[in-house]
Image (tube, rainbow, N blue to C red):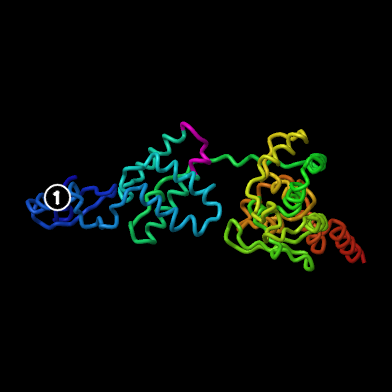
Amino acid sequence: MAIFMKKGNWWIDYRVCGRRKREKIGTSKTLAISVLRKRKVEIAENRYLDVKKQYKIKFEEFADQYLELHSKPNNKSWKKSDLPNIVILKRFFSGRYFYAITPEDIEKFKIERIKKVSPSRINRNLSCLKSMFNKAIQWEKIEGNPVTKVKMLKVSNKRLRYLEKEEIARLLSRCSKHLRPIVVVALNTGMRRGEILSLKWEDIDFKMGIIHILNTKNGEKREIPMNEQVKTALIRVPRNPNGPYVFCHKDGRSINDIKKTFWTAMRKAGIINFRFHDLRHTFASHLVMSGVDLNTTRELLGHKSLELTLRYAHLSPDHKRRAVDVLNRQMDTIWTPEAEEKKLEEKLVAVSH
């Protein structure tokens, strides 16, 4: 905290709730010193004018509100996404007032976490924290988001594992009866695991050959065309009169976890270093290797931008060659060496005559 003069006026400089504040007082140095003392007392007694009453909520209390009012109503997989992140954030920030958390505090959180987990997991923690602050702003509990001033950690996205054709055949042959159609759908549509397991019969249009996905990761509806393998696999799945789900338990409840059965099939097939989500990579990789353009692949995957789809570009070694070949055909109509030689011969003939 300090006072200083600028252009003939005295200013006071202090920090509150992690934010720097400056106030123009006037030409009196004595008054500036007096106001600065007053601000110190207000901050110490939590009576500073910029700190609203609704700010005074502990982090763990707001975290619980966030789960109840935002996560549970809007995120079906909140137990697997928001909840684990909030548990971690509570361990570090519990006991602190929510409004008092600063960018410096968040940097300390990053330093502490990097000793234990990967950068990608820390980024998920930070994304959750950022969402919490954004929601607090919408609910008029705070005015700013300190996470916006904190950089995410760099993450290597080089991992791209997909199955070769021989591996696909081996995996399908080792799948249990109820797992096989799930894997067939994943391999032939690129659908995410959650999208497949939450699939209802009403979402499938066998006549038009389309699967309608209403609740996607990016919040947009998506229509996925079915090939014959998908149609056949789904037609063979017996319908359960106790529920609307395609893949469900005997009592009609949707299947939420196939990790154990999928891992068993992988072990029997002798396939290692592979996750269920990599079936989506397999779908996209084989499309690109078969000559399907990246934008069409993007649409089928449901990516909003081409940036994520570009990770598959290297699998199409001929895509650059095809591009310049198209340009070559265009140029052929404008100029070719043969046409130039013919013009030269015609000029020579004309001159000789």
Reply above or below: 5 against 241. Answer: above
Of the pair 94 and 329, the residue shown nearer to us: 94
**Magenta range:** 115-123
User: Which quadrant: the C terminus?
Assistant: bottom right
The spot of residue 199 in percent (x, y) is 67, 58
Which residue is at 28% across, 52% downward? 56
Q: With 100 as the anchor, is 202 left or right in this view?
A: right
Q: With 27 as the anchor, is 19 left or right in this view?
A: right
Instruction: Check the image and name the residue furthest to the top.
Output: 115
Reply above or below: 333 against 307. Answer: below
Name which residue type carries label 1: Leu
The spot of residue 194 in percent (x, y) is 63, 52
Of the pair 310 and 323, the residue shown nearer to us: 310
Query: Which residue bears the numbered disc 1?
Result: 36
Q: With 171 as the anchor, is 142 left or right in this view?
A: left
Could one spot residue 319 in this view of the protein?
no
Which residue is at 44% across, 53% downward? 67
The spot of residue 289 in percent (x, y) is 77, 48
Which residue is at 38% across, 42% downward? 106
The spot of residue 219 in percent (x, y) is 57, 61
